[in-house]
Image (spheres, grey):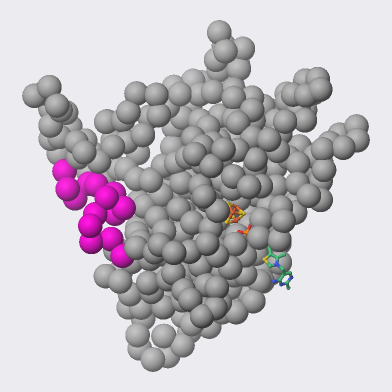
Amino acid sequence: MIEAPLTDGRSSTVDAESSTRVKFYQTGTFTAGNRLLDTELRTVQSSEERTNAITCGHRACQGCGEALGARYALDAAMRATNNNVIAVNATGCLEVFSTPYPETSWQLPWLHSLFGNAAAVASGVAAALRRQGREHIRVVAQGGDGGTTDIGFGCLSGMFERNDDVLYICYDNQGYMNTGVQRSSATPPAARTATTPALGSAPGNPFGIGKDVPRIAMAHNIPYVATASVSDLHDLEAKVTRAMSMHGARYIHILVPCPLGWAHPTRDTIRVARLAVESGVFPLFEAERGEVVRSNAIRRRIPVEEYLTTQGRFAHLFKPKRDEVRLAALQELADKNIERYNLLPGSTTMESTTMKEVKA
Ligand SMILES: Cc1ncc(C[n+]2csc(CCOP(=O)(O)OP(=O)(O)O)c2C)c(N)n1
Ligand code: SF4
C-alpha cells in the first residue's frame, strides 16, 4: 500500500499491486486519473518515454477504437519487455490502415502474412527465436475478431494447444470492418451489419449463434486469458504487463468500438466501450490455467438499453417500435455475465439487482 496525496491536503492509500482498486476517478466518467498517482503507478501512455508503437500518420478513421487499443497494448508490451517485442499482424483494418505500402506506422519489428495465419506465423517466429537462443525477444500476435474468431481460429487453437510462447491479442470490433462491416462470429445478437441487415421479423444478427472466444481459450487451459476494454486504460495495461511476465500461450480479448460499423459519433468511442462494461455486456476478467482468478466489479451498473441506444446498429430495436422481447433477451445475456463473473460482488442473488431496481 502507498500513500497518495489528495488536492485538499488529505491523503488516501492505494494498493500498488492492483490496477482495479485505484481510489481516484472522475465523477461521471469513473475514469481513474494519473494526476494524483505516484509516477510509477501512472499509465504507460502518460509517460513521455512510451514507445508510440503505432505512431501518427496512419489512416484509421477518426475515433477508431482499434488504433487506440493497439497502441495501448503494444506500448505496454514494449515497456514490460524493455522494448524486446516482435509483432505479427493478421489482415484487417489494423494492418491496412497502418501499412499502406511503402509506408508504416509501426515503431517495432512487425510482420504481416495472411488473414488467417497470424497465430501460426507468430508460433514460427517464437520457435526461431528459441532456436537462436534469443528467447528474451517476445512475440505478440494480433488481429481483428474476424481474423481471430473465424478464419484464424484453427491456427489460434493450435497455438494454444501447443502452448507456444506467444501473446495473442484480439481487437474485437464485432465485425469484419475493413471490408465493409460484415457479420463475424463475435457480432452480438440483434446488431445490424451489411450481412445481417435491419430487415424482416427479426432484424439484425440472429440470436443463438456466435462464439465466446475468451471462454474457448480458457478451455485450452493456457497460462493466461483476459478481457480488456479501451475505456479502462490502467486495467488494459496491467493485463498486458501481466501477460508479458508469463511464458506460454496467452490470450487477451480487447473491446474496441468502431464508429463506422457501430454507427456512433467518433467522439463517443471511449464512452461506448465504458457503457459495454458497466452494463455487463462486456465482462472484464482474468483467468489462469482455465480458472477465472479476478474480475472487475461494475462501479455503476446501467441497463443494457443505455448502452444500445448509443449505437445506430441497434436502432431498429427502438424504432419504429420497441422490440421488448429482444431487448429483454439482451438484458438477460448481460445479467448472465454479471452472475458468471461476479461483477456485482455485494449482491448475493440476481433478484437483488434486477434492472427494475437499477432503473428505480
Ligand atoms: C483469405 C482472405 N479472405 C478475405 C480477405 C479479405 N479481407 C481482408 S480484411 C477482412 C476483414 C477483417 O475483419 P477483422 O478480422 O474482423 O478485422 P477488422 O478489419 O474488423 O479490424 C477481409 C474479409 C482476405 N484478405 N483474405
Ligand atoms: S472501420 Fe472501424 S476499425 Fe476500421 S479503421 Fe475505421 S473505425 Fe477503425
Q: Splitting the image into 4 quarters, where does residue 262 fall?
A: top right
**Image quarter where ligand 2 lies:** bottom right
| Number of marks | 0
**Residue 236 in the image: x percent, y percent?**
41, 49
| Relative side of 196 to 133, left or right | right
Q: Position of residue 59 (x, y in %)?
A: 52, 62
Extreme-bottom residue of the structure: 132
Q: Residue at x 48, y 45 (%)?
A: 229
Q: Is residue 186 visible?
A: no
Residue at 34% over, 23% down:
27
Q: Which residues are magenta?
A: 38-51
Q: Of residues 274 and 65, which is closer to you in this image?
A: 65
User: Which residue occupies 66% across, 60% down?
Assistant: 178
Viewport quadrant of the N terminus: top left
Relative to residue 339, is residue 235 drawn left or right? Answer: left
Res 103 seen here = yes
Occupied quadrant, residue 330:
top right
Q: Position of residue 102 (x, y in %)?
A: 51, 80
- The answer to if 193 sits in the magenta stretch is no
